[in-house]
Amino acid sequence: MIKRATEVQTPTVHDHFGRFAAVASGWLGSTWAFVGAGLVIAVWAATGPILHFSNRWAQVIGTGTALMTFLMVFLIQNTQNRDARAINLKLNELIRAMDNARNQMIDIERLTDLELDAMQATYEKIKSAWTDRQARTPRGPQEK
């Protein structure tokens, strides 16, 4: 029996942060958010001469962007996790629905790195065997 790597399970019941992250990332990825950020930078730059380009003036934008970047990392990660999970579930359904597909491919993202390495080596052998067969196959005059 193969031991599975421990994974972090996140609760999805009453997933307020997930809904917030989906809405926030949708809005923050919009044209209007980009325009708003551009306006913030323009206002900050315009106040430079008024504040004599002081250290505090520079710290304001540095601190603001650092805080926003820190928070955005969590929003982006949450959104990517949800997208990856949805894609994996869709692929699992395709594998399940196909007659010739191997069902052990379902949920392989939960395998350990060693198990994935072994599976990759198997597919590299399959590809190598196919390449060898192609090299030995005589080609007709139209394919030269």
Image: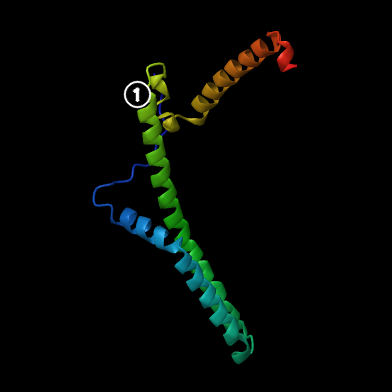
**Quadrant placement of the C terminus:** top right
- 52 lies left or right of 87: right
Residue 138 occupies which quadrant of the picture? top right
Name the outermost residue toward the front.
142
**Residue 134 on image: x %, y %:** 66, 13
> Residue under circle 1?
97
- 131 vs 68, left or right, is right
Quarter of the rendering occupied by the N terminus: top left
From the viewer's perspective, is residue 87 above or below residue 71?
above
Q: Indicate the position of residue 74 as horizontal and vertical percent values.
A: 43, 56
- Quadrant of the rendered structure where residue 89 is? top left
What SS does tag 1 mark? helix
Q: Position of residue 82 (x, y in %)?
A: 38, 46
Residue 97, horizontal then vertical, whole percent: 34, 23
Which of the pair 54/25 is nearer the observer? 25
Q: Residue furthest left?
A: 14
